[in-house]
Amino acid sequence: MLNLVNFRSLIDIAIVSFIIYRILVLLVGTRAVQLIKGVFILALVLAAASFLQLTLLTWFLRTTLLALGLAIPIVFQPELRKMLEELGKGQFYLLKRSMSTDEAEVRVNQITGALSYLKAHKIGALLVLQQNVGLGDYTETAIPLKARITQELIISIFWKDNPLHDGAVILDKYNLIAGGCYLPLADAPEISRWYGTRHRAALGISEVSDAIVIIVSEERGDISLAVKGKLSKNIKDFQIERLLRHYFAGEQVLTGWKALSRTLSNIFWVRSVEQDAGGLVK
C-alpha cells in the first residue's frame, strides 16, 4: 500500500476531496440535502438486505438507486449551475475570508441605524440573517441584490412605495443577497391571530432553517425576533446590537439548545447590559 502512495496520488486525492467538499457546501441548506439523506438511508438498507441475502429487496433497492442516479443531475440542476457559475467567476474557494472587528462593527451600525429609522416611522420590515442553512430556494425566486449592507439601501427597500417592500430581505455576513423574498408561512394553531403575515413568515422560515429573523411591526413600530420557530417580542436596541455583533463576528448564533441557552444568556441577561438598560427583559 505504501508503494502505491506517491506525490501524484496525494494530489489526485486532494483534488477529488476538494471537489466533493465544494459540492457538499453548495448543497447544504437546500432541499437537495433531504434527497441525499434519503439515498444514504436506501444505501444502508441495501447493504443490510444484501448481507441478509434478501434477494427481492436487494434487486428492488438496486433498481431504485440506479433510477435515482439518472434523476439526480436533473434534481440538482440549480446547484450544479451555481457551482459552475462560481467556477467561472473564480470563486471556487475553500474557505471564506474572516471578517475584522471594524468590518463587523460597520455592518452592525448600518443595520441598527436602519432598524431605528424603520421603528420611528413605523415602516414594516423583515430581515433574514442567513447562517449555516442556505436559503437558495427563496433567493432564487426573488430579486437578486448582491449589494453592500447599508442603512440607506435597507430603508429604501422597505419604503412603502418600493415594489420590494412587501417581501423579506435575505442577507449573509457580507451582502444583501436578495429582496422581495416570499417565505413559508407558519400555520401552527397556537399562533395568535393578531400576528400579521410578516410575523408568520418570520416564524415559518425560522422553523425550516437556522436563520435569525428580525421583524419591524408596521402597526406598533416595535421589533420582534424569530428563532427556531419561537417569537420574542419587544426586543430592545441593545439586545439587537449584541445579537448582530455575535452574528457578524463569525460566531455560530442560536444553532442548538446549548448554544441557544448560552447566547440568550449573553444577549438578554448579561448583568452589565441589564443595568445600562434599566431592567431585566422578561
Image (cartoon, grey):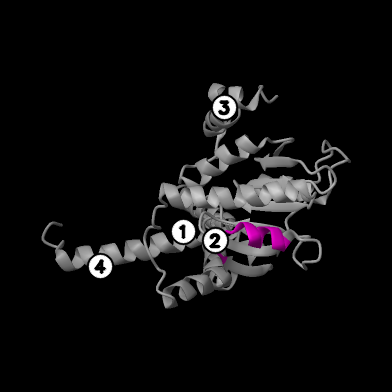
Q: Residue furthest bottom?
A: 88
Looking at numbered disc 1 in the image, what kind of residue is underneath it?
A: Val
> Which of the numbered marks, if any, corresponds to residue 226?
none
Q: Residue furthest right?
A: 193
Q: How would you rate the neighbour count of disc 3 (Cα within 10 Å): few for under 14, some for 14-19, many for 20 or more?
A: some
Cα–Cα span, label 3 and label 1: 37 Å
Decide: is 112 above or below 68.
above
Q: Which residue is mark 4?
A: 12
Which of the two marks, 2 or 3, is nearer to us in this view? 3
In the rendered image, residue 275 lying in the magenta stretch gets the answer no
Which of the two marks, 4 or 3, is nearer to us in this view? 3
Looking at numbered disc 4 in the image, what kind of residue is underneath it?
A: Asp
Q: Which residue is mark 3?
A: 273
Q: Which residue is mark 2?
A: 175
Whether residue 78 sits left or right of residue 233 in the image: it is left
Q: Which residue is mark 1?
A: 25
Looking at numbered disc 2 in the image, what kind of residue is underneath it?
A: Asn
